[in-house]
Amino acid sequence: MNETKNIVLAEDNTTLSQLLKFRLQKEGYTAFIAQDGKQAIELIEKHNPNLILTDIMMPFISGLEVISHVKNKLKLETPIIVFSAAGQEEMVLKAFNLGATDFMAKPFSPNELIIRIKRILI
Amino acid sequence: METFKILQNYFQQLPIELQLVWILSSFLACIVITLSIYLKFLRNLLRKKEVLKIKLQHKYEGLLLSYLFEESNDNELSEHQNEFIKIIQSKINDDFKRKIIVETLLKLKNEVSGEIERAIQNLYLKSNLKEYAYQQIKSKKRYIVANGIKELAQFKVKEAYPEVKKLLKHPKKEVRKEVELYLVSLFHFEGLEFLNNLKVNLSEWDQIELLEELKHFENQEIPDITPWLKSKNETVVLFSLKLAKIYNKYEIVDTLIQLLNHTNQKIRLQVIDVITHLQVLDAKEILKNSFKVRSLEEQIATLKMFENIYEPNDEDFIIENSTNNNFEIQYSALKMLKNISEKSFNNLLKKNNNFDNNILKFIQNN
């Protein structure tokens, strides 16, 4: 029997995070929602997820700091997908330098996100 | 009663100046107390409103998500979906709740694309929110009209074009700005047609917003901007020059050269900037020949332009300006001369001892 895969989603837009949570649950994943970077780090440390989805711009701790924490402090190899808005190209490059696996520019298609997640979590 | 009489007697015995001070102090104390009570009431009201807003946001978020997930399963609307549409329709005339519903829809619509975005769009159209926005654009209050147009643009209601276009000549700037953004965000470069007949000024901020909107489109094929460069509206000319620079419009070089003689100095300066960006070599001779009759700002801009496209045959012009009284012109000229011919540069230094040592040191070391 396959073990359910855990995903931590850090996104300050509650409507979007709820939508993605529904989609992820529908696909059989367990999603933990964080509304800011601080909560995301707490959830990552607690659940050690198989995948992290994070927005770049978030209150308290940014997505870049979350990636840095995961890769440099926790020394985890967890794949990370970053969400970026238009005009954040430099941030995306920084995210890749810090160890992000993939990125999706907003507005994005939730279906496409699911496909990317499935490819990463094969 | 006794105390009041004692106070009254005391007050009456006071000199008139002190009585006035007492009256004024009492009056001010009353105002402070009233305002404090009012502020406390207002703060409580706003807090209650905020709590209610968050509660309603959660409620509508839930309903929206149920709507979206049910729609993706079936083409026909389910009972729950119709119920949500009915809820929206019943709240349309409640300004507070309608705003929260629209905000909730936009909050998700701006972040997603594909079928979910289309589903939100359909929900907006089916739930009569569009009709309400149509009503808003007929309002007499300018901010309501502007909001209505903005909403129609955000939900990409192209059918509203005839109604919105009528407002292009609206006396209020806020409304005109929203109309322009509506046209550009929905019809892209074709939407810029309003520039053909624009009589009012396009502010710097409006121009930035339009350029920002244009950046989002995949198709960056911009139409012919020559008519706008020849417009009588100087702000349209300035905006078109920005378009020429951003979209590298090499085909408008002839018009740019003509604009070097425009009556407005700001336009002439921006033309030199675009010519510099496009590296129009044909403009060099024209600028050299008219250099002395141009304003100081244009002369500085011309030298900056030469810094990017100078050639050995520009040496005479550069030497001529290396003794210019203006620091920026002199500095640019000396820098170019050193790069074109070290020999001419050294000869010039020998002949002329009036150069600022600091400039020379800097140029020699760089």
Image: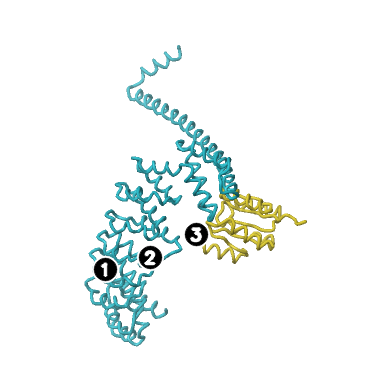
Chain colours: A yellow, B cyan
Residue tagged 1? B259
Q: Position of residue B114 (x, y in %)?
A: 53, 56
Q: Position of residue A101 (x, y in %)?
A: 62, 64
Foreground residue among B126 and B296:
B126
Instruction: Name the residue: 39% across, 43% down.
Output: B134
Describe the element under mark 2 as helix, strand or loop: loop
On what subunit does the disc labeled 2 rest? Answer: B
Whole-angstrom CA distance, mark 3 to mark 1, is 35 Å
Residue tagged 3? A86
Instruction: Name the residue: 49% across, 32% down.
Output: B40
Q: Amino acid at mark 1?
A: Leu
> Do pointers 2 and 1 mark residues of a single chain?
yes
> Do pointers 3 and 1 mark residues of a single chain?
no
Q: Amino acid at mark 2?
A: Ile
Describe the element under mark 1 as helix, strand or loop: helix
Residue tagged 2? B222
Q: Position of residue B190 (x, y in %)?
A: 37, 60
Callout 2 touching callout 1 (CB < 8 Å): no
| Quadrant of residue A57 within the rendered picture | bottom right
Are there few (<14), some (14-19), or many (20+) residues within 10 Å of tag 1?
Answer: many
| Quadrant of residue A79 within the rendered picture | bottom right
